[in-house]
């Protein structure tokens, strides 16, 4: 249970980070708290949209999905089952791959680092890690 | 089972704390006055000034006019505005002997000078220029050392009785950026290189910056103008 609880708390944190970046993109909160100024460079670059959708909005929806699922996986009916953990790991894995792609863009294309994006990257990596640990805990070999 | 229930209770408590804190931060960010940046070196359009040549105080028939080029963040301008100007106003301006023209000359090394000038310009729209002008100078030590001066100027505007909806719209639009630049350009053209710089009846003033020296200057210029 501790893994799924951790996943839920991390998802909530990631949701707030993404919401912060998305509100900035919408022009609702003025400037970003970002010492290097790289956040604004990244957020205002052409790569801040994927297929016409803001990356920050994708983050909001992704973390909302992870939050919903990690909370659902805590419910008594699903708590001891393996497949919710597999689904959580799968969703977080997609997030890790997407974050890897965005980090590549920041380092090699945009040449600016957004600290909030880095924080989000650690968060999604954390969710992926605890989902894998949960999967390992519930693996058939261990259950025997 | 009891241990599991206790663990869930702790989890939901922590979850609620993070949720409330996160929502609180987002609500604060959404409701705080937005950061304002007034661009420098903008191209001045004719419509930016529409004949505007500074903020004027005093009688239009006064024999002497002094133009002050100043920067709200300049400490010397602050001292002059708060210590000398009240006497100059009482002794010379209110008695019809002197007309005072204030023009903006924001120095590039003063990061909030242009925002301050713009704040006063937005207050001017609502007839509160001199009130805001005084508050900005009096509060210089407060906002000059802050990380973001715009919200402080907004509190001055509120205290001055400015309609904040119109004020915010004016600040966000940077409506008077061109007019401030026009002031600065006119100062540069006249040879202004530091602040405050005074021009008495169109000529650069090289004397002392105190009310007694200004009074002597005004008396002298007034005698010459009546001859």
Image (spheres, coloured by chain):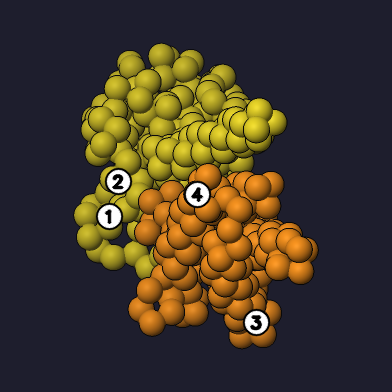
Rendering colour (chain A): orange
Indicate which disc residue B170 carries: 2
Vertical order, B207 against A8 (above or below): above
**Which quadrant does the N terminus of chain B fall into?**
top right
Rendering colour (chain B): yellow
Q: Which quadrant of the view contains residue A114?
A: bottom right
Vertical order, B58 against B35 (above or below): above
Q: Which residue occupies the extreme bottom position in the image? A: A109
Please identify, in this view, whether the residue under mark 3 or under mark 1 is nearer the observer.
3
Q: Which residue is mark 1?
A: B49
Instruction: For mark 1, name the chain.
Output: B
Residue A135 pos. (x, y %): 68, 64
Please identify, in this view, whether the residue under mark 2 or under mark 4 is nearer the observer.
4
In the image, are marks 3 and 4 on the same chain?
Answer: yes
* Residue in the picture at 43% in, 38% down: B27
Dot 4: what SS?
A: loop
Give the CA separation, mark 3 to mark 2: 40 Å
Using a 10 Å C-alpha cutoff, classify the residue at mark 3 as few (fewer than 14 neighbours), some (14 to 19) or many (20 or more).
few
Q: Which residue is mark 4?
A: A77
| Sequence-first disc among 1 and 2 | 1
Foreground of the two, B117 or B195: B117
Dot 3: what SS?
A: helix
In the picture, measured across the screen, residue A143 lies left or right of residue B204, that is: right
Q: Which residue is mark 3?
A: A104
Foreground of the two, A59 or A11: A11
Q: Which quadrant of the view contains residue A90?
A: bottom right
Residue B121 pos. (x, y %): 34, 41
């Amino acid at each position: 249970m501790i893994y799924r609880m951790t996943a839920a708390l991390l998802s909530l944190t990631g949701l707030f980070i993404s919401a912060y970046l998305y509100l900035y993109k919408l022009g609702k909160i003025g400037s970003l708290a970002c010492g290097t100024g790289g956040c604004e460079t990244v957020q205002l670059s052409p790569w801040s949209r994927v297929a016409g959708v803001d990356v920050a909005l994708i983050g909001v929806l992704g973390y909302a999905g992870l939050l919903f699922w990690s909370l659902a996986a805590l419910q008594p009916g699903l708590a001891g089952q393996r497949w919710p953990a597999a689904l959580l790991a799968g969703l977080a894995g997609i997030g890790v791959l997407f974050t890897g792609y965005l980090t590549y863009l920041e380092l090699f294309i945009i040449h600016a680092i957004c600290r909030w994006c880095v924080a989000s990257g650690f968060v999604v990596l954390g969710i992926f890690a605890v989902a894998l640990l949960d999967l390992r805990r519930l693996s058939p070999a261990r259950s025997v | 089972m009891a241990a599991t229930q206790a663990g869930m209770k702790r989890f939901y408590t922590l979850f609620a704390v993070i949720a409330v804190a996160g929502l609180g931060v987002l609500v604060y960010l959404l409701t705080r006055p937005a950061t304002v940046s007034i661009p420098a070196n903008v191209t001045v359009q004719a419509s930016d000034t529409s004949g505007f040549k500074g903020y004027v105080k005093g009688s239009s028939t006064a024999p002497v006019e002094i133009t002050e080029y100043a920067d709200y963040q300049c400490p010397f301008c602050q001292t002059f505005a708060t210590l000398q100007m009240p006497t100059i106003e009482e002794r010379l301006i209110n008695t019809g002997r002197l007309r005072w023209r204030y023009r903006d000359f924001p120095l590039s090394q003063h990061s909030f000078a242009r925002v301050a000038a713009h704040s006063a310009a937005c207050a001017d729209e609502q007839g509160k220029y001199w009130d805001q002008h005084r508050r900005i100078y009096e509060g210089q030590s407060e906002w000059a050392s802050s990380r973001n001066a715009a919200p402080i100027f907004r509190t001055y505007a509120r205290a001055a009785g400015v309609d904040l909806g119109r004020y915010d719209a004016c600040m966000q639009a940077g409506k008077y950026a061109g007019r401030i630049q026009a002031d600065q350009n006119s100062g540069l053209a006249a040879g202004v290189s530091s602040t405050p710089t005074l021009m008495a009846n169109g000529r650069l003033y090289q004397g002392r910056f105190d009310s007694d020296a200004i009074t002597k200057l005004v008396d002298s210029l007034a005698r010459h103008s009546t001859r």
